[in-house]
Image (cartoon, rainbow, N blue to C red):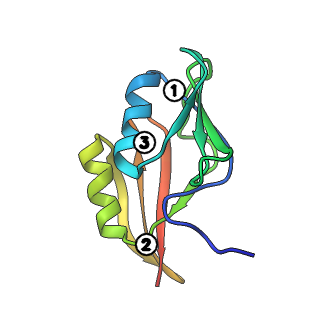
Amino acid sequence: MQGPQHHTLSYIEFGVTDLAATRAFYESAFGWSFNDYGPAYSGIRTPDGAGEIGGLNPGAPPSNDGPLVLLFSDDLEATVEAVKTAGGTIVSGPYEFPGGRRFEFTDPSGNRLGVFAAA
């Protein structure tokens, strides 16, 4: 089984208030690419472009009360800077945890996610 890949996650759907701004954020911060389904949905492509691992749904309300989705990073400090540059807000960390370091951020629609790196 393959281990975590840099800036990837399993399929998850984000409710968004602004599809274009939220998509631009993830493109800039993590280099994600999307399949567009008109103004109602953008699917997050897998790193190889062969499938999808998630989506942005402007028809669902964003929430920071849901599960904390974690992305993996090969370079946590560079990812912190990418999130800030793309317009995200760091809300916690970076901090140490057993096995590595992580931080948490919110995207332009208010979704809260975390990013971790191995020790």
Q: Marks 1 and 3, Cα distance to the nearest angstrom?
A: 12 Å
Tell me the residue that label 1 is attached to: 16
Distance from Cα at disc 2 to Cα at disc 3: 17 Å
**Residue 74, labelled with which disc?**
2
Secondary structure beneath label 3: helix
Residue 81 rendering spot, x and y as whole percentages: 26, 57
Q: Quadrant of the N terminus?
A: bottom right
Binning the other alpha carbons within 10 Å of mark 2 as few (below 14), some (14 to 19) or many (20 upward) gives some
- Residues 69 and 73: in front is 73
Q: Element under label 1?
A: loop
Q: Residue furthest top?
A: 39
Q: Position of residue 79 (x, y in %)?
A: 35, 61
Q: Which numbered disc covers residue 113?
A: none
| First in residue order: circle 2 vs circle 1 | 1
Answer few, some or many: residues within 10 Å of disc 3's Cα (few below 14, many 20 plus, some between 14 and 19): many
Are dots 2 and 3 in contact, CB under 8 Å? no
Residue at position x 63%, y 42% in the image: 66
Q: Say which of marks 1 and 3 sits in front.
A: 3
**N-term-proximal mark, 2 vs 3:** 3
Badge 1 crowding class, 10 Å Cα cut-off, few under 14, some 14 to 19, many 20 or more, is many
Query: Is residue 26 rendered to the left or right of residue 87?
Result: right
Residue at the location (60% across, 47% down)? Answer: 49
Dot label at residue 26: 3
Amino acid at pointer 2: Asp
Q: Are marks 2 and 1 in contact (CB under 8 Å)?
A: no
> Which residue lies most toward the right here?
1
Question: Which sits earlier in the primary sequence, circle 1 or circle 3?
Answer: 1
Tell me the element at label 2: loop
- Answer with the quarter of the image where residue 18 lies: top left
| Residue drawn where x is 64% and y is 41% of the image | 54
